[in-house]
Image (cartoon, rainbow, N blue to C red):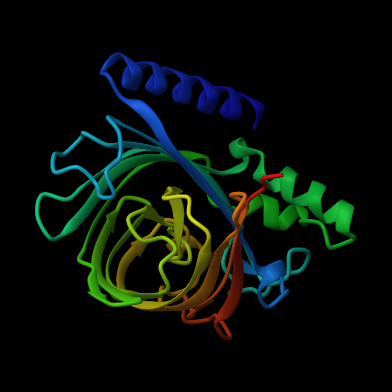
Amino acid sequence: MTRFIVLALGLCAGLSTMALAEGRERIGYGVLFTNDVIGDTKDRWRTGSVASSRVWADGWNGAAPAGVGELLEFRFNGEVIAPEDLSRPAVQDRPFVGALSFGLHTHFKPAWIEYSAGADLIVTGSQTGLDDFQDFIHDIVGERNISSNVRRDQVDNAFRPSGVFEAGREFNFGMARIRPFAEARVGVEDLVRAGADITIGMLTRNELMVREPVTGQRYRVVRADRPGLAFVLGGDIAYVDKSDYLPARSGITITEDRARLRGGAHWEGRRGGSLFYGVTWLSEEFDQQSDGQVVGSVQFRLRF
């Protein structure tokens, strides 16, 4: 795992130097933590992830620039997916997945519609060290460790290129905003998705929000820095054609329809400290999955 951390740091340093050389400055940063410990507490399936973004551009005027590539987002994500029982999983449960991804994305708004597009390199398998990291965390909290069979059957070591494209338009109704969107993903998972997000409150207005891939929660990256509250509700449905996280060798069948329902609240104080907490219901991702699950997401910034 250490070599991938070094690789990520080197990649970020290289891309940052490139962005500076082209006259951009870093205008935002955001990170969102997601875990079922702060959701339904059941430690299974889409059990934990982190999404982080660093954004470079020639300033920010309250909206993404019109041109493709004028604003660059360097993205690093990590995710652990697990069977329901890590020590003695059911015969037809999903395999363990450790995934780290490094990507370059751009956000642009030539007219009324906002677009984002980008590519990621997703590293999977025991080479990520996330199975060992999961055991380390479980040792601390006194939970079950991963059995040798689960380790052996985890998704293979691989480097998987992936791409994502999203288009959305925000409609303002006073204190409320509604943003329908459509999304397509290819690579580690091939899917198309449509949905909408509703925001009530002034906070997050004129900010760059980035969508986290597991839950669809949008987290703050380029901020307007004003105190306030905002409540969010959202949902979407996807058609899934393929998932490398659910390989045929595992003996399970992909559920083609995948739904998410989410809600949460953003708060920012007068000194700049901020907090977001959200919950997301995720529908079943394979036919043998007994039910959906609920995960929680947190973003925070401390200011004293």
Residue 135 locus on image (x, y percent): 79, 50
Q: Residue furthest left?
A: 111
* Front residue of this view, candidates 124 and 15: 15
Q: Which quarter of the picture shows residue 141?
A: bottom right
Residue 201 location, quadrant: bottom left
| Quarter the N terminus occupies | top right
Residue visible at 36% across and 41% down in the picture: 120
Front residue of 267/262: it is 267
Task: Please identify the quadrant where the C terminus is shown.
Answer: top right
Q: Is residue 146 left or right of residue 186?
A: right
Decide if residue 217 is in sight here: yes
For the point 44% across and 47% down, the residue is 221
Residue 108 to residue 288: above or below: above
Choose between 200 and 184: the one closer to the eye: 200
Compared across the picture, whether 26 is left or right of 169 comes to right
- Residue 196 locus on image (x, y percent): 30, 75
Residue drawn at (60%, 71%) of the image:
295
Quadrant for residue 234, please give it: bottom left
Q: Position of residue 53 (x, y in %)?
A: 45, 42
Work out which residue is located at the far bottom of the displayed protein and give it.
291
Could you say which is closer to the camera, residue 304 or residue 278?
304
Asked whether residue 46 appears in the rendered view, the answer is no
Location of residue 178 in the rendering, given as x and y in whole percent from the top left corner: 29, 76
Q: Is residue 235 left or right of residue 111?
A: right
Name the residue at 20% across, 53% down. Answer: 115
